[in-house]
Image: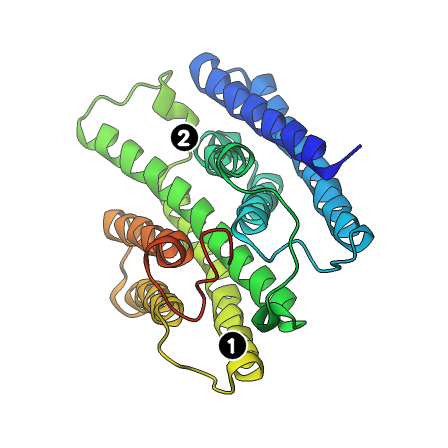
């Protein structure tokens, strides 16, 4: 059994989970909602084993590093963190319908990783040969994952708010499966409250890593600049909520904009901009 086989099984599990969640939306059968969550959890367990196995494989090859060093590995880890944060929200609040709007993010990442990226295990470039790699990547991607969950919840909020404004609410309709908009707004806030401190830690550990690798804590590299932009967007979200009572649509749109900026920080900078963080299209 190799890690690539387990990653393929993970992708299939996330696809099955998404299909079951969509069936849950169509049928309103609570058993299907629970089944969708269980399949996602099984996929998470398999993916955890796959990541651990890939780590072992790197040592067997004499490379020996955490599987977080290139674009393939980071996309796989991003998908893993999305399902992890979803599992936390799902177990705590039990709003199964959220899975239909969050699991597709993880599936998209795994599908792209398996079909469109170089899956080879390669030696680390000198700048990545540090324990700060693990600290920085883990904290950043847990933060990114929380923002992905917040984005999915915000999309749900906007759909339900538009439906209610249209005056077409039906007690037995699809929107009845969605949590009340007040709950969706609160879940959006709670997800961002998970992600923002993690992103902050990610920026701090990244600065420490930069000082170790390049002798400076901050150099206004495109990745550093965009990470700061993302941080300011979510800081503005929290500031506006605390001081001006921003809730509802404005908060939902700001959450979606923040996640779009997060994706550009993660992928757009790597693929389209050059800088100290650009180690080629296959690198972090």
Question: Compared with residue 92, is residue 1 higher up or lower down, i.e. above or below?
Answer: above
Q: Position of residue 181 (x, y in %)?
A: 34, 40
- Lateral position of residue 263 relative to residue 13, left or right: left
Question: Compared with residue 186, is residue 160 higher up or lower down, i.e. above or below?
Answer: above
Q: Residue at x 36, y 36 (%)?
A: 156
Residue 176 numbered tag:
none
Crowd tier of the residue under label 1, counting other residues whose Cα lies within 10 Å: few below 14, some 14–19, many 20 or above = some
In the foreground, 203 or 113: 113
In the foreground, 45 or 187: 45
In the foreground, 222 or 206: 222
Q: Nearer the viewer, mark 2 or mark 1?
A: 1
Q: Position of residue 165 (x, y in %)?
A: 19, 32
Q: Position of residue 133 (x, y in %)?
A: 61, 67
Question: Compared with residue 28, is residue 119 higher up or lower down, i.e. above or below?
Answer: below
- Lateral position of residue 26 relative to residue 175, left or right: right
Q: Position of residue 95 (x, y in %)?
A: 51, 34
State which quadrant residue 35 falls in.
top right
The residue positioned farthest toward the top in the image shown: 27
Q: Residue at x 58, y 18 (%)?
A: 32
Residue 178 numbered tag:
2
Which residue position is annotated with label 1? Answer: 204
Crowd tier of the residue under label 2, counting other residues whose Cα lies within 10 Å: few below 14, some 14–19, many 20 or above = many
State which quadrant residue 6 falls in.
top right
The residue positioned farthest toward the bottom in the image shown: 215
Q: Tell me the SS state at disc 2.
A: loop
Q: Tell me the SS state at disc 1.
A: helix
| Tally of numbered discs | 2
- Lateral position of residue 50 relative to residue 70, left or right: right
Q: Earlier in the sequence, mark 2 or mark 1?
A: 2
* Measured Cα–Cα span from mark 2 to mark 1: 37 Å
Tell me, yes or no, whether the two marked residues, 2 and 1, touch with CB atoms within 8 Å.
Answer: no
């Amino acid at each position: 059994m190799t890690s690539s086989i387990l990653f393929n099984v993970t992708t299939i599990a996330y696809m099955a989970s998404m299909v079951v969640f969509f069936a849950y939306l169509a049928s309103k059968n609570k058993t299907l909602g629970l089944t969708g969550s269980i399949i996602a959890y099984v996929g998470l367990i398999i993916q955890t084993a796959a990541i651990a196995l890939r780590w072992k494989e790197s040592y067997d090859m004499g490379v020996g590093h955490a599987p977080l060093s290139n674009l393939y590995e980071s996309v796989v880890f991003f998908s893993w963190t999305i399902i992890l944060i979803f599992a936390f929200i799902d177990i705590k609040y039990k709003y199964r319908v959220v899975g239909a709007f969050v699991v597709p993010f993880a599936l998209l990442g795994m599908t792209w990783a398996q079909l469109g990226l170089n899956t080879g295990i390669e030696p680390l470039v000198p700048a990545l040969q540090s324990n700060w790699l693990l600290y920085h990547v883990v904290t950043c991607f847990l933060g990114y994952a929380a923002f992905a969950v917040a984005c999915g919840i915000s999309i749900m909020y906007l759909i339900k708010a538009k439906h209610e404004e249209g005056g077409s609410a039906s007690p037995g309709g699809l929107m009845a499966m969605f949590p009340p908009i007040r709950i969706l707004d609160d879940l959006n806030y709670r997800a961002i409250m998970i992600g923002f401190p993690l992103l902050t830690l990610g920026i701090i550990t990244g600065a420490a890593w930069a000082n170790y690798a390049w002798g400076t804590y901050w150099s206004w590299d495109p990745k550093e600049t965009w990470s700061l932009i993302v941080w300011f967007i979510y800081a503005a979200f929290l500031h506006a909520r605390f001081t001006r009572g921003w809730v509802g649509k404005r908060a939902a749109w700001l959450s979606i904009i923040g996640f779009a900026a997060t994706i550009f920080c993660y992928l757009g900078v790597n693929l389209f901009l050059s800088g100290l963080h650009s180690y080629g299209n296959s690198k972090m």
